[in-house]
Amino acid sequence: MTDIAIVDYGMGNLRSVSKALEHVAPTASIVITDDPEVVRKAGRVVVPGQGAMPDCLRELDKRGLRSAVRYAAMSKPFLGICIGLQMLCDSSEEGNVEGLGIVTGTVRRFPSTSVADSSGLRFKVPHMGWNQVHQAIEHPLWKDIPSDARFYFVHSYYVETANPESTAATTNYPFSFTSAVAKDNIFAVQFHPEKSHDAGLTLLNNFVRWEPFQFQEGIVKSTRDLFPIQT
């Protein structure tokens, strides 16, 4: 069985993600795949992505991956990166499209070609480069990463969550926006850990060792027990 499946829907820097995961988990079986069954049966799933959300969703559907990604997001350790976070939301202003509806929220565009803070300082759009990530909750994927560590961003849209409890981190540009969400077995980030040097590698290392659990009728069960693989 594949240990980690990186979902290939034709969008995103897949090789960089794969190389970073191979660095932190050299003995793991890691594949880049567009096969829905491989995604369904993998132990962990990573959904990276770059580009326009309407194009990403169209390619996801074209390759028959939508249901496999939804299944993975409900049943196993799941990491979304950049568009891999945004697609989880209910909808996006980019193309006015519906997302996967797994994380309650909307993807918004930064308000103009440049935005300003309260002092009038201008910030360019897209938000590109290094910025601080302020941890909003304790989470296993933040292990050994200080709050306000710097990660690498490239995006013109951001997630506005409807449920503040799902916000795992925020970033200022120039206002505060959600830069990571956590929900059960899902962790998803707006930044690119594969491009974020030590902090990014630490987060990926935490992901490959993360064992999320859920409670059901007072008994702790792993997500794989709660959602067995369907063959």
Image (tube, helix red, strand yellow):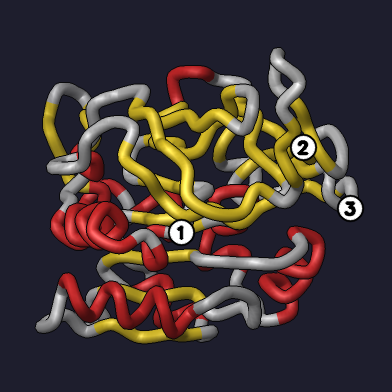
Mark number, residue 13: none
Q: Is residue 199 above or below residue 24?
A: above
Q: Quadrant of residue 113?
A: top right
Which residue, given by chain and number where applicable, does mark 2 sit on? 110
Residue drawn at (79%, 40%) of the image: 109
Q: Nearer the viewer, mark 1 or mark 3?
A: 1
Q: Is residue 231 above or below residue 185?
A: below
Q: Quadrant of the C terminus?
A: bottom left
Instruction: Give the residue type at disc 3.
Output: Gly
Q: Is 211 on the left-hand or right-hand side of 55?
A: left
Q: Are marks 1 and 3 in contact (CB under 8 Å)?
A: no
Measure how far apart labels 2 and 3 are at the Cα level.
14 Å
Residue drawn at (38%, 29%) of the image: 134
Q: Is 25 on the left-hand or right-hand side of 169?
A: left
Q: Residues within 10 Å of mark 2 (few under 14, many from 20)?
A: some
Could you say whether the residue bearing mark 1 is in a helix, strand or loop? loop
Residue 45: percent from left, percent from top: 37, 66
Q: Quadrant of residue 111?
A: top right
Disc with the residue nearer the chain's start (2 vs 3): 3
Could you say whether the residue bearing mark 2 is in a helix, strand or loop? loop
Disc with the residue nearer the chain's start (1 vs 3): 3
Which residue, given by chain and number where applicable, does mark 1 sit on? 192
Measure how far apart labels 2 and 1 are at the Cα level.
18 Å
Q: Nearer the viewer, mark 2 or mark 3?
A: 2
Measure how far apart labels 1 and 3 are at the Cα level.
23 Å
Residue 229: percent from left, percent from top: 32, 66
Which residue, given by chain and number where applicable, does mark 3 sit on? 95
Q: Are marks 2 and 1 in contact (CB under 8 Å)?
A: no
Instruction: Give the residue type at disc 2.
Output: Phe
Closest to the observer, 75 or 153: 153
